[in-house]
Image: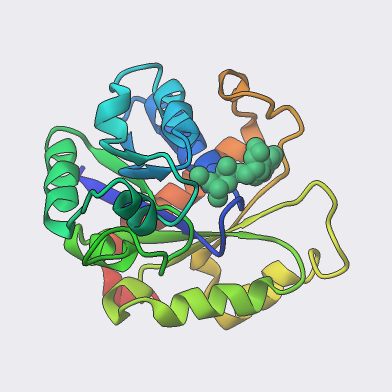
Amino acid sequence: MVPQTLVITGTDSGVGKTVLTALLARHLRDSGTLVRAAKPLCSGGREDAEALHSALDGALSLDQINPWYFRAPLAPLLAARRERRHVRQVEVLAHLREMRADCQVLLVEGAGGLLSPLGEDFDLRHLIIGLRAVPIVVAPNRLGVLNQVLLVRAALPEAARRRLQVVLMSERQPDFSSHSNPALLTELIDVEHVHHLPWLRKLSSPTDWRIDPTVRRALQRLFKCCVSCNRSPTACG
Ligand SMILES: Nc1ncnc2c1ncn2[C@@H]1O[C@H](COP(=O)(O)OP(=O)(O)O)[C@@H](O)[C@H]1O
Ligand SMILES: [Mg+2]
């Protein structure tokens, strides 16, 4: 398999990026794929990196998964500046390329949303382009999600936009729009690019991430679409 890089972003913080990244990591690892995962920049805690560490059964160190971390719960650029540190695109890309060199799939979780400032000269779009990655946007399936997804899509550079995959994340309590959002989004984007994950009632800690068959099928389909978009981006939307 040609090495794949998938970059996971979201319409906001707290929408399920870490949940999806960890589930994908666990699923791919379970199916015999050599997968690595990174959350290159963390601010305000390293829980996301710890979740990925646990999803990969400790196959990578926390510092490999997350080389840059800052104390303040702010956008990474600001949190770094408070510690008089300055992170540049070139060093983050070098780390991610090195991680990718000896695996089949590299998963990269962003911080915040697509345009959140990550370092002195970059946001997640630069990493997506620099890694020729498939962008995945996680979005909570509730009222407002269509606008949020379309805004993220519009903000992506064109080459990446054609590869975009959307994961609608179910909420504990669906609202009136939750039922109709997937069909309309499919109409607005493309059926091959819209995915859906259920609310996972048992998700209390990363060690509980046993994947049930419905979720496994959704992850399989998502990964398949990512690979086929990467192979032939012109065929994607
Ligand atoms: N599909 C889901 N099922 C159950 N809990 C979820 C689901 N998606 C997100 N959550 C919960 O929502 C919270 C935020 O998710 P997280 O993945 O940390 O978001 P992000 O990485 O986008 O900030 C976490 O407590 C997580 O367990
Ligand atoms: Mg996260």
Q: Residue furthest right?
A: 176
Find residue 126 and report its image quarter. bottom left
Residue 145 location, x and y as percent? 67, 71
Residue 68 horizontal side relative to residue 55, left or right: left
Q: Which residue occupies 39% across, 52% down?
A: 110
Residue 51 location, x and y as percent? 48, 29
Find residue 67 and report its image quarter. top left
Q: Which residue occupies 43% across, 57% down?
A: 75
In-front residue for pair 106/40 = 40
Residue 52 location, x and y as percent? 43, 30
Q: Can residue 218 be spotted in the picture?
A: no
Q: Quadrant of the C terminus?
A: bottom left
Q: Which residue occupies 27% across, 76% down?
A: 159
Q: Quadrant of the N terminus?
A: top left
Q: How many marks?
A: 0
Tell me which colouring the rendered structure shows.
Answer: rainbow
Q: Can residue 3 be spotted in the picture?
A: yes
Vertical comparison of 226 with 52: above or below: below
Vertical comparison of 190 with 13: above or below: below
Find residue 119 and report its image quarter. bottom left
Residue 106 location, x and y as percent? 28, 42
Residue 201 horizontal side relative to residue 98, left or right: right
Q: Which residue occupies 68% across, 29% down?
A: 203
In-front residue for pair 36/92 = 92
